[in-house]
Image (cartoon, grey):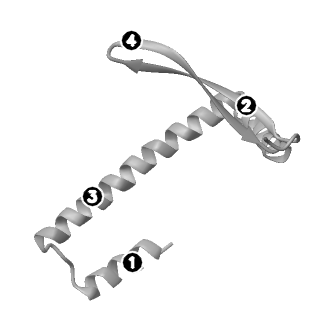
Amino acid sequence: MHDCFEQLIVLKTVVGVAGACYTALMEIRFTPEQERLLSQVASQEGTDIEHLVRDAALRLLEQDAQFRGAVRRGVEQADRGDFIEEEEMEARIERMLEP
């Protein structure tokens, strides 16, 4: 049973399977405060909550795929013995942290 104060947002997505498309529904529950914040951001962006949440989820999936790819490439490099010296690593980190 869900908290009676939670708001329910239903997302509709079009999913392609073997060349066929169909609409799938997903329920996501937000507290009233979370929904207020989502509504505020959606309004500022000129969209609705459904599109805002869907776009955010798609960005998350894209960023996750990029991160996992980078980790996979790093593991492959380590497996090949491709390492950098500690001094080079520290220099790279310093360059990344420079304003």
Q: Which residue is mark 3?
A: 72
Q: Which residue is mark 4?
A: 20
Q: Amino acid at mark 4?
A: Ala
In percent of width and height, residue 89 lies at 30, 80
Disc 1: CA contacts within 10 A as few (<14), some (14-19) or many (>=20): few
Farthest top residue in view: 20
Mark 4 or 1: the one toward you: 4
Image quarter hosting the N terminus: top right
Mark 3 or 4: the one toward you: 4
First in sequence, mark 3 or 2: give its number. Answer: 2
Q: CA distance from mark 4 to mark 1?
A: 47 Å
Q: Nearer the viewer, residue 37 or 6?
A: 6
Q: CA distance from mark 3 to mark 4?
A: 32 Å
How many badges with numbers are in the image?
4
- Label annotation for residue 93: 1
First in sequence, mark 3 or 4: give its number. Answer: 4
- SS label for mark 1: helix
Q: CA distance from mark 1 to mark 2?
A: 42 Å
First in sequence, mark 2 or 4: give its number. Answer: 2
**Is 6 above or below relative to 76?**
above
First in sequence, mark 1 or 3: give its number. Answer: 3
**What residue is drawn where x is 59% and y is 33%?**
54
First in sequence, mark 4 or 1: give its number. Answer: 4
Q: CA distance from mark 2 to mark 4?
A: 26 Å
In percent of width and height, residue 26 lies at 61, 29
Q: Nearer the viewer, residue 35 or 27?
A: 27
Q: Which residue is mark 2?
A: 9
- SS label for mark 3: helix
In percent of width and height, residue 51 lies at 64, 28
Asked whether the residues under the numbered discs 3 and 4 touch, taking CB atoms below 8 Å apart as contact, a structural biologist would say no
- SS label for mark 4: strand
Disc 2: CA contacts within 10 A as few (<14), some (14-19) or many (>=20): some
